Amino acid sequence: MPKKIDPAVRERAVRLVLEHRAEYPSNAKAIAAVARQEGVGAESLRRWVVQADIDAGNRDGQTTEEHAEIRRLKAENKELRDKVAILKAATTYVGDRCQAVA
């Protein structure tokens, strides 16, 4: 199971890359240096920086807010499907009971 990174460490690492990447020959070198300094995985930091660029509008992609909204809507959709299934089962049961009485 992956270890949970403190959100403050994550924010600081991303901020350091964004503020200092011009000082490095490439984005990858900046990420590698900050990852070593902060004790986080370089690939994790790379993904966080990409997401920060998307959230800032500097890169195309799904923002954090859009992703959260999609997750919320998927959960709501599942809940509604479950409720519809329960109502269908109840309707069938009640219908069968009514026919048995008649």
Image (spheres, rainbow, N blue to C red):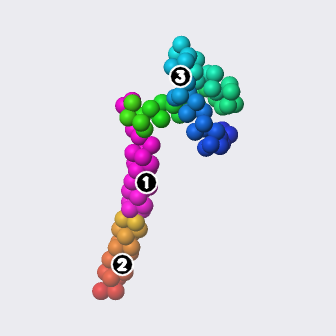
Q: Identify which residue is drawn at 53% across, 22% down.
A: 21
Amino acid under disc 3:
Arg
Q: Which residue sits furthest bottom?
A: 101
Q: Identify which residue is drawn at 41% across, 58% down.
A: 76
Report the disc number at residue 21.
3
Do the CB atoms of the residues marked 2 and 1 lie less than 8 Å apart? Answer: no
For discs 3 and 2, the disc positioned in front in the rendered view: 3
Do the CB atoms of the residues marked 1 and 3 lie less than 8 Å apart? Answer: no
Q: Main secondary structure of the magenta part?
A: helix
Report the disc number at residue 72.
1
Amino acid under disc 1:
Arg
Q: CA distance from mark 2 to mark 1?
A: 33 Å
Among the two numbered marks 1 and 3 on one chain, the one whose residue lies closer to the N terminus: 3
Label 3 Cα crowd, 10 Å radius (few <14 / some 14-19 / many 20+): some
Residue 17 x, y percent position in the rendering: 56, 27
Label 1 Cα crowd, 10 Å radius (few <14 / some 14-19 / many 20+): few
> Where does the magenta region start and end?
59-82
Residue 7 x, y percent position in the rendering: 61, 43
Q: Identify which residue is drawn at 48% across, 30% down.
A: 50
| Quarter-of-image position of residue 75 | bottom left
Q: Which residue is mark 2?
A: 94
Q: Nearer the viewer, residue 100 or 84?
A: 84
Position of 95 with respect to 23 (left or right) is left
Q: Identify which residue is drawn at 33% across, 82% down.
A: 98
Residue 63 x, y percent position in the rendering: 41, 40
Among the two numbered marks 2 and 1 on one chain, the one whose residue lies closer to the N terminus: 1
